[in-house]
Image: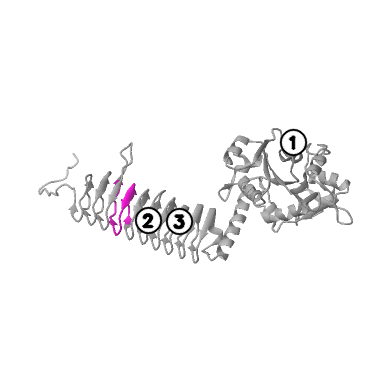
Amino acid sequence: MKLGVVILAAGLGKRMRSSLPKVLHPLAGRPLLGHVLDAAQRLEPARIVVVHGHGGDRVKAAFADQDCIWIEQSEQRGTGHAVIQALPAVEGLDQVLVLYGDVPLIAAETLRDLVALGAETPLGLLTAELEDPTGYGRIVRDRDRRVTRIVEEKDATPEERRIDEINTGFLVADRPSLADWLGGISDDNAQGEYYLTDIIGIAADAGVQVATSQPAQLAEIAGINDRVQLAELERVYQRRIAEELMRSGVTLADPARFDQRGRLVTEPDVEVDINVIIEGEVRLGAGVRIGPNCLLKDCTIGSGTEIMANCVIEGAMVGANARIGPFARLRPEARLADETHVGNFVEIKKSRLGQGSKANHLTYLGDAEVGAGVNVGAGTITCNYDGANKSKTIIGDGAFIGSNTALVAPVSVGPGATIGAGSVISRDAPADALTLSRSRQATLTGWKRPQKKS
């Protein structure tokens, strides 16, 4: 059967108190709508339709690479009205599944079960049982436990409000039947809106057997209306990710203080300390250890490497058995070979460090090619930018760069060369020789410091 997915994402989100459309607020580093689109795509539907409203241009721009149809609901008149706007976009399909752009944790497995119900009956509904159903529409059943209708809380009687089975909003329906049922709904209710839920009563009155299923976890159906709820679901999501990592062999010092906002691939025996943030695509080799308070984004860390406390690594590749930090920063296109050492307050950008090379203190390496076995002394910088252009520094294997050296690019330091401490090197330094540039030291005897005048 050809499945169409309709995602309702037109809500204003007033309680977020933000100029950003609600469905663009991030959860685990991704917009809420992105999580819902992922779940929908895993069903491999024939078509995905997103109904947008407030901030629609921003929403569309954020998902410009997505293969979906965008429908504007210029006037927000309820969920039923929103689905009516989407009906022309699902013409010719067999089933329609309705999702919500602000309910980000819905699982594809739960949706598959719901769609399977829709293959057996014209209407399938996802429900849940809550200890406190306040605020939700209630599922009304007859004596034979057949669903007869859904009543919104504002329209419910005291007896109906005691029902603990609630409507989650997720449903799957036969497309032609859905169109017919939507034609029968009205806005004669407390909100003056067209409720999608009204089709349940219409279908039941027509003798349709309404099938129901329930999610594996209640968090799947939790919507987000304000920043408190957003923060609560963030922790739910992060706990899920943490548990998956630990079951796969990763040691987390404290699962409650770990945040993954991208995709993490790990090999066995990785250890991660507290307050580590993962963004983008990150790969950690076997036995990698990550110290506390580190940010890793779009990087690859080789086996046996230790990232010490308070490091920021972005767009970098680090080889095996290296040691980074503490307080080191690796910027995009930093490429560190095996057994390299990068210490405290060292910044590396668009540079390569050869095997076994070290830059242990207070150093900046930018646009540099550093060979194997090089020692870069404290306070060394590559002066790679002249205010208009970037130039390259090349340091050969086995070179020794003395402390407080400025290498003015473009410049080359030959293999085995030694650069004396405190030098400014603006011309190529030959291999296997000492090169230095510093003023001759002098001592003036009998000199006295100036004194203040009385």
Reading the chain from its start, which is encountered first: label 2 or label 1? 1
Residue type pointed to by label 3? Thr
Residue 238 seen in the figure: yes
Q: What's the mark number on residue 77? A: 1
- Label 3: state its secondary structure: strand
Between the residue at mark 3 and the residue at mark 1, the CA separation in whole angstroms equals: 49 Å
x%, y% of residue 284?
A: 47, 60
In the rendered view, tell whether residue 151 sits above or below residue 88.
below
Residue type pointed to by label 2? Leu
What is the count of numbered marks? 3
| Quarter holding residue 20 | top right
Residue at numbered disc 3: 300
Between the residue at mark 2 and the residue at mark 1, the CA separation in whole angstroms equals: 57 Å
- Label 2: state its secondary structure: strand
For the residues labelled 2 and 3, say whether their Cβ atoms are less than 8 Å apart: no
Residue at numbered disc 2: 336
Q: Which residues are magenta?
A: 359-382
In-front residue for pair 249/257: 249
Residue 135 seen in the figure: no
